Each structure stands twice: as C-alpha cells, then as structure tokens.
C-alpha cells in the first residue's frame, strides 16, 4: 500500500524542472508519433500485396479478379482487395481488422493453400462475405457506385427498370451481383448453410407419437440398421414419430398418391403436386410400408388418387417442432433472391400446381442450393391461391 501512495504523490506533485508547456508539448508529440505509427501500420495491411501474401490468395481469387471488369475496364479504374473487403469508415475498419484476425490462423494452418482446399472452403468464405455486405448494405460497392450518379439513359430498358427499382429502396448491391469479382461457389449440392444456422440441427430429444417437420431433405431407409436407401423425405414435411432406435426414427407420413405405376410419390394433399416424399419402386411395393385408406378421382385429370400413410425409417436429425422458422427463411429468401431483378409475384398470384413451373423458370437466374430451392417452392405452393383466396 505504501508504494501505491508514493507513486500517487509523485504523479500529483508539480514538476520541479519541467514547465506545463513542455509536458503538454511532449505529450502531444508522443501522441502524434504513436498515432502516425499506428496509422502507418494499419495502412500497410490495407494493400493488395499484403492481402495476397497473407491470405495465400494469389493462386485463386486474385486470378479470378483479373478476369473481371473490376480489374480492367474502359475507365481504367481498378478495384483492389481492400476496396471491397475493408470498410472506409475508421471505426468499421478497426472492427473489420479485429474480425479478420482469425484469418491469420487459417494462413498459419494452410487452410486454403491448395486449389482443392480453397474450393472446399469457397462457399463458407463467400457466405461470410455476403452476410457482411448485406449488413453494411453493400457500402463497399456504393463507395464507388452511387445510385444518384447513374446515367439511366445509357442503360437498356430492362436495366433501367431493375436499377431504378433498386435505387428507390437503396437496395444492397450484393442481392443481384454475387460473383461480380470472384467465381460463385457450387451451391447445387450444398446443405443450405444459412438455413441450418437459422433452424439448427433439430430437436435433441424426440418423443414418440409427436409430430415434427423436416428441416432438410432427408434420406429414407427400410429399417433402423441398413444403409440401403428407400427414398427421399422432402423438406418441410410433417411426420409423426412412431419409434426411436439409436440415431434413427420410424416415421409416419400422411398424404396422397396417384394410383398409377408403383405409386411411389407421396403428395401433401389430394390433387396437389406438393411433394412430401418419394420412395423407391421397391420400397413402395414393400409390404407394410404403404397403407391405403380411401380412393378418389380427380375431376381435373381423371386420375384416381389414394389417401395413404407410409411408415418408414429416417435419421433423427433435422426434425423440428415448429414450421414457422422454415417459412420465415423461405419468405426472406424468396424476397431477396427471387424478386431483386423484376417485380415480385405475390405468393397468392398462382395456385399450388402452377407454382413449380413458374419457380423453376425463376431459379435459373439465382444461385440457390437444392434444399433451399425445395423449401422456397413448397412455401410458395402452401401459401398460394389454393389456400388463400384473397388475391382472387
């Protein structure tokens, strides 16, 4: 305690040999030197050379950038790595530097030092950057591209329509322009990382005789042990847990099938092409899998439909009790991905059987994984005019 008192006295006593001006000037100069050194070091990390050397990125993304308009164009203006990936605002820049510090571990552990490793991580890295661009409303883009400065008359009629609509709501550029500087990741076979992050991996403790919804598309099996697949259980399908053994559950799937062939496709309801599950031919003909309750003829097609229940096994993960988070994600995805380039058709604008054809024509222009495609299509079908007549 005595040493603390002595230090306090020393700090609070007037200087014997230094004037107040000298002390103030010294403190000012030290502050300038510190700030200058800190800012110089900060700017050194904001160069393209630093990014390439530190992130082992020269072999892949840097070469991809060189093939785009951001590298070479008629104006001669080039965008470098920091222009897009480091915010210009000082406080956000510091936050971004802290956020990116974990990349040093990736560099040290050589996480993306080969083309194969880079491709494996491309989707993860791209998703992280897309989220950051969305969070900042694509501020990095708008530092150079300003809606107010655009010459609408030099654009095509279609571009004018799209860009004026985007300008009216100050839309984030990344909504339409993913892949503008780097190759897009292969989303086709990925397992909806953003959806998984939102809904989780399912309920930890399942109960028999309870109803659940599938959060992802899941494989079906003949029993609790075999690896031979018996079909596919579609996303956002309601199932009843009948039995639990280890990591698998036996589920009951209520629905309708067309009385044609093996009748292996299970639909959500009579006369509606909303997919719930698709069994293999052998599974559909397996005794005890399908139970038929009634038959009804569809007046529109003349086909006979059967109301059935399928009892079959699947993995116990990605089964959730609440369907609403799935619909919320589908609605948000439809709004941001499917309506950014044109006027968005309302969910109730088409009936359940018309939406698949319309939606398949739309997804050709967006980058969407298979699970998300299936979920958004089912969301549109189950919120169509078939179920809500208010639009007509």
Image (cartoon, rainbow, N blue to C red):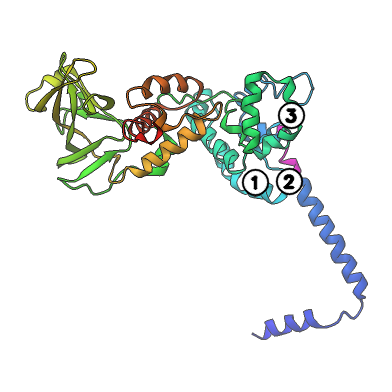
* Extent of the magenta region: 42-49
Q: In the rendered view, does 55 fall on the left or right side of 232?
A: right
Residue at 72% across, 43% down: 88
Pair 1/3: label in front: 3
- Taking depth in this image into account, of 290 and 218 the one nearest to the observer is 290
> Which residue is drawn at the image coordinates 14% and 21% (left, top)?
284
Instruction: Classify mark 3: residues with Cα within 10 Å, few (<14), some (14-19) or many (20+).
Output: some
Q: Nearer the viewer, residue 219 or 61?
A: 219
Q: Which residue corresponds to mark 1? A: 97
| Observer-nearest of 156 and 140 | 156
Is residue 336 positioned above or below 61 on the image? Answer: below
Residue 82, can we see it? no
Which label was assigned to residue 42?
2
Secondary structure found at label 1: helix
- Asked whether disc 1 touches disc 3, contact meaning CB atoms under 8 Å apart, the reply is no
Mark 1 vs 3, N-terminal side? 1
Magenta run includes residue 244: no
| x and y, in percent, of residue 384 in the image | 36, 31
- Disc nearer the start of the sequence (2/3): 2
371, above or below 258, in the image? below
Q: Which mark is residue 150?
A: 3
Residue ranking furthest to the top: 261
Q: Quadrant of the C terminus?
A: top left
How far apart marks 1 and 2 lie (CA) works out to 9 Å
Q: Determine the main secondary structure of the stretch shown in magenta.
A: helix
């Amino acid at each position: 305690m005595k040493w603390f008192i002595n230090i306090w006295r020393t700090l609070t006593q007037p200087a014997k040999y230094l004037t107040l001006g000298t002390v103030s000037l010294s403190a000012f100069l030290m502050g300038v030197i510190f700030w200058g050194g800190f800012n110089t070091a900060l700017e050194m990390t904001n160069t393209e050379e630093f990014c390439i050397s530190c992130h082992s990125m020269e072999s892949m993304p840097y070469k991809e950038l060189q093939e785009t308009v951001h590298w070479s164009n008629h104006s001669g203006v080039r965008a470098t790595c920091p222009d897009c990936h480091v915010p210009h605002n000082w406080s956000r820049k510091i936050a971004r530097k802290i956020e990116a510090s974990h990349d040093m571990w990736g560099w040290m552990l050589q996480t993306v030092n080969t083309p194969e490793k880079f491709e494996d991580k491309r989707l993860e890295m791209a998703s992280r950057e897309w989220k950051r661009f969305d969070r900042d409303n694509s501020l990095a883009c708008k530092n150079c591209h300003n809606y107010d400065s655009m010459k609408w008359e030099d654009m095509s009629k279609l571009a004018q329509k799209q860009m004026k609509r985007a300008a009216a709501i100050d839309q984030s550029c990344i909504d339409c322009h993913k892949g503008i500087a780097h190759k897009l990741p292969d989303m086709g076979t990925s397992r909806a990382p953003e959806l998984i992050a939102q809904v989780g991996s399912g309920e930890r403790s399942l109960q028999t005789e309870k109803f659940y919804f599938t959060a992802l598309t899941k494989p079906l099996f003949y029993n609790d042990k075999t690896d031979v697949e018996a079909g596919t259980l579609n996303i956002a399908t309601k199932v009843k847990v009948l039995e639990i053994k280890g990591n698998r559950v036996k589920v009951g799937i209520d629905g309708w099938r067309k009385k044609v062939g093996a009748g292996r496709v299970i639909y959500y309801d009579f006369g509606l092409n909303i997919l719930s599950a698709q069994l293999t031919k052998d599974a559909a003909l397996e005794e005890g899998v399908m139970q038929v309750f009634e038959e009804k003829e569809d007046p529109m097609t003349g086909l006979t439909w059967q109301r059935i229940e399928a009892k079959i096994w699947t993995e116990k993960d990605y089964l959730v009790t609440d369907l609403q988070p799935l619909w919320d994600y589908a609605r948000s995805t439809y709004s941001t991905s499917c309506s950014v380039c044109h006027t968005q058709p309302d969910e109730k604008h088409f009936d359940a059987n018309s939406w698949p054809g319309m939606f398949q024509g739309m997804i050709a222009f967006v980058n969407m994984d298979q699970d998300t495609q299936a979920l958004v299509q089912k969301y549109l079908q189950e919120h169509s005019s078939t179920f809500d007549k208010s639009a007509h």
